[in-house]
Amino acid sequence: MAATVAVLAAVALAGCGGHGAGAGTGGRLRIATTVAPITSIVAGVAGDRADVTGIVPEGADSHTFEPRPSVAELLSTADVVFLNGLSLEEPVRRLAESSAGDGAEIVELGTRALPEEDYIFDFSFPEEDGRPNPHLWTDPTYARAYAEIAGDTLAARDPDNGAYYRGNVEAFSAAVDRLDAAMRRALATVAPERRKLLTYHDAYAYFARTYGWEVIGAIQVSDFEDPSPREVARLIDQVRASGVPAIFGSEVFPSPVLERIGREAGVSYVDTLRDDDLPGAPGDPEHSWLGLMRANYATITRALGGDPSPLEALDVSLPAPDRAVYPQ
């Protein structure tokens, strides 16, 4: 495995309890969420029966994002705060715990969805640090679990709308099934020896385990310093030895280091992946977790010589409207 550059995270989150009627407009639940994929998943469950507001702006580094003081007011009025957990968004978690009102509930979707025996520790998230890789939502298996946990939580808080929330979970689960089928058809067209990823961020570990891929490295800079020449040379050698035709960067976080690795290894550098920045703009059909997965895995499939058409043909719309407020 290739070495990566430092990692951000702290201790795992803990939920706090309380059940009661919604405090939002007209008795509607007020829900706060963190990163955009979680906001999208929760919004798909909440539909038009609850008010969902995101906290972490798209394109921000969720590991280090420091919420503005105004976020404390939002958190103080929220009935439920949904976080990823697994130490992904520690500054927000700390503020939520200090600001939450009486009876509010903090729900760590990733912590609840991922049994400890299934933790993945890797070059970015070493076991000696005690913090597993937290990027579960790039694996549809866990996105489905996030929706189920969100649905159960909202139904318990707002039982009058429980059947509505559970219906939205069923619709989301059916969409996940369609995505999974399209992914498997598209990814199967990539030659087995090319099913390897070197990316700008170590966000695909659970995807790789579920779909039989290999993550060969990640450039994950947490201290804003470039990796050492030795680390760069090691990654260049790995890319050459792997035989992959492309490595992947982000259009949100440009990486001159990855660009150099691609150039010196003689492979394409594709800089259009995202891990928590949704495609399009709020209100667009593709501005969703489903749209994000379709875009990322179509990009990966195409760059590695496969046929992305099953993914490109996928309908990413859901019956429940996404009325979440996404921060800018």
Image (cartoon, rainbow, N blue to C red):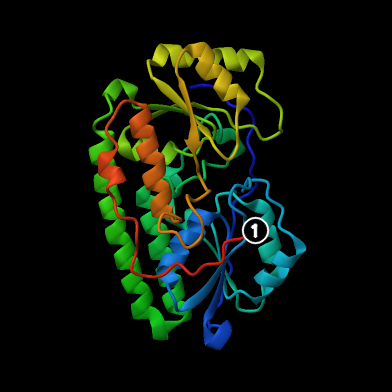
x and y percent of residue 248 in the render? 48, 29
What residue appears at the point 46 percent right and 57 percent down from the top-left corner? 112
Residue at 50 percent across and 44 percent down: it is 275
Depth check: 314 or 233 in front?
Answer: 314
Picture quarter with the C terminus: bottom right
Instruction: Write the residue at 41% across / 68% down.
Output: 45
Residue with the most extreme bottom position: 26
Q: In this view, does 81 lie above or below 158?
A: above
> Residue 113: image x %, image y %?
43, 55
Q: In this view, does 285 lie to the left or right of 131?
A: left
Judging by the rendered image, the residue that carries numbered circle 1 is 93
Q: Where is residue 105 in the image (x, y as percent from the top left)?
A: 57, 71
Asked if residue 174 can be seen in this view, the reply is yes
Q: Is residue 322 left or right of residue 87?
A: left
For label 1, the SS is helix
Q: What's the residue type where badge 1 is placed?
A: Arg
Asked if residue 226 lies left or right of residue 79, the reply is: right
Which residue lies at the image location 66% right of the left edge and 18% below the top edge?
228
Looking at the rendering, which quadrant does residue 97 occupy? bottom right
x, y percent for residue 186: 26, 37
